[in-house]
């Protein structure tokens, strides 16, 4: 089979690999769609010397059909449509039983520790195979594996009431999925995004207001749109220092924020949160059981997840796909198989 390897210095390569064979309790899935995620870009942009010797296939948003089963698999059948949860765990420890396979001491993440989704086939555990109903495309299933799941799980932590205002910092794929889900949850969305193409996409997906933080001070603009009070909640996906501070400063008294955009800047001061009694939370992908809650919201409210996809490419155009996504101007970029 073919698989994409990220070489660093913004280069990728399609290589030949042996087809995976399922062992006991394992499943091989034939890929139909595989998403490119922001965290893949970290590895794509890494220095080539840091990537030297890496031979792991990239990608952690797998979706496709079950190709073959190892012994002992009873929950899926050959030909079944599945989205694949993107961390493999032992299945028995406290964290696995709680659904947080990514916290398992033996966890293995696709595209980093084990071969990922930018390949013709992927090997997984039967428990990682999540049913994808026929109403939803493979592209949707791929996004639900990380991108949309990350946004859904974050909004679940904010728990916005209908009618509340949510400020979403960054409208890359996670921010855009956040906009879609926050709208489906009945909130008003203010999307903060410096790139014109992504602001346009955010509006098309239902954002009530958009702010260009390079043209206007995001904090003042959010206050202006909320009669001086500030947003009820904020969702930080940009990973920028201005986004992190903005997500805190734009909140109303007693507001709450959730962060998924990684940044190493220690620019946040306790004085920003104490007097205003803010609640700040971190979020990291989603526990596996939450896939079913996300699926229900998407189906019940007709969330147009597919509308986020701006580029679909075959695997052999990996270099072009990563370059497009790296431009920071796209919606979701996905690999698709016929
Ligand atoms: Zn991801
Ligand atoms: Zn475990």
Image (spheres, helix red, strand yellow):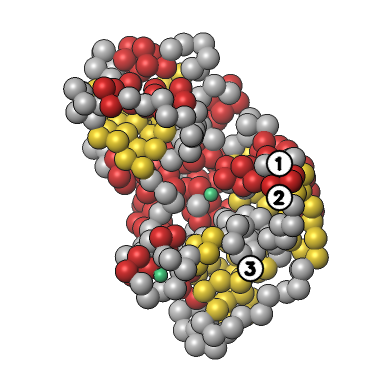
User: Distance from label 3 to label 2 (Cα)?
Assistant: 22 Å
Q: Is residue 87 left or right of residue 197?
A: left
| Residues tagged 1 and 2 counted as in contact (Cβ below 8 A) | yes
Q: Quadrant of the N terminus?
A: bottom right
Sooner in the amino-acid sequence: mark 3 or mark 2 = 2
- Which residue of the protein is positioned furthest toward the bottom in this rendering? 71
Q: Which residue is mark 2?
A: 51
Label 1 Cα crowd, 10 Å radius (few <14 / some 14-19 / many 20+):
some
User: Distance from label 3 to label 1 (Cα)?
Assistant: 27 Å
Label 2, secondary structure: give it. helix
User: x%, y% of residue 184?
Assistant: 36, 41
Q: Which residue is mark 1?
A: 47
Above or below residue 29? Residue 297 is above
Q: Which mark is residue 122?
A: 3
Label 1, secondary structure: give it. loop
Nearer to the camera, 61 or 305: 61
């Amino acid at each position: 089979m073919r698989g994409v390897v990220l070489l660093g210095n913004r280069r990728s390569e399609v290589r030949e690999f042996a087809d995976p064979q399922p062992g006991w309790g394992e499943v091989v899935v034939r890929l139909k769609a595989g998403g490119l995620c922001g965290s893949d870009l970290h590895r794509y942009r890494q220095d080539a010397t840091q990537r030297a010797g890496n031979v792991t296939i990239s990608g952690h948003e797998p979706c496709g059909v079950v190709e073959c089963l190892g012994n002992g698999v009873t929950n899926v059948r050959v030909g079944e449509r599945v989205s694949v949860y993107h961390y493999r765990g032992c299945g028995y420890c406290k964290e696995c039983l709680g659904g947080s396979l990514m916290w398992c001491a033996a966890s293995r993440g696709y595209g980093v520790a084990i071969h990922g989704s930018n390949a013709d086939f992927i090997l997984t555990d039967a428990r990682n195979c999540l049913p994808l109903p026929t109403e939803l495309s493979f592209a949707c299933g791929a996004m639900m594996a990380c991108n949309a799941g990350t946004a859904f799980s974050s909004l679940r932590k904010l728990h916005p009431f209908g009618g509340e205002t949510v400020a979403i910092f960054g409208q890359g794929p996670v921010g855009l999925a956040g906009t879609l889900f926050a709208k489906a949850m009945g909130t008003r969305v203010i999307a903060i995004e410096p790139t014109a193409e992504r602001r346009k996409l955010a509006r098309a997906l239902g954002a009530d207001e958009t702010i260009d933080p390079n043209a206007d001070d995001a904090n003042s603009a959010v206050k202006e749109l909320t009669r001086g009070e500030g947003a009820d909640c904020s969702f930080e996906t940009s990973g920028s220092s201005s986004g992190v501070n903005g997500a805190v400063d734009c909140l109303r008294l007693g507001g709450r924020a959730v962060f998924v955009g990684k940044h190493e800047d220690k620019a946040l001061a306790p004085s920003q949160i104490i007097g205003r009694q803010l609640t700040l939370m971190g979020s990291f992908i989603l526990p596996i059981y939450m896939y079913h809650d996300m699926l229900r919201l998407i189906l019940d409210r007709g969330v147009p997840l597919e509308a986020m996809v701006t580029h679909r490419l075959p695997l052999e155009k990996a270099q072009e796909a990563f370059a497009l996504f790296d431009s920071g101007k796209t919606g979701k970029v996905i690999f698709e198989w016929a």
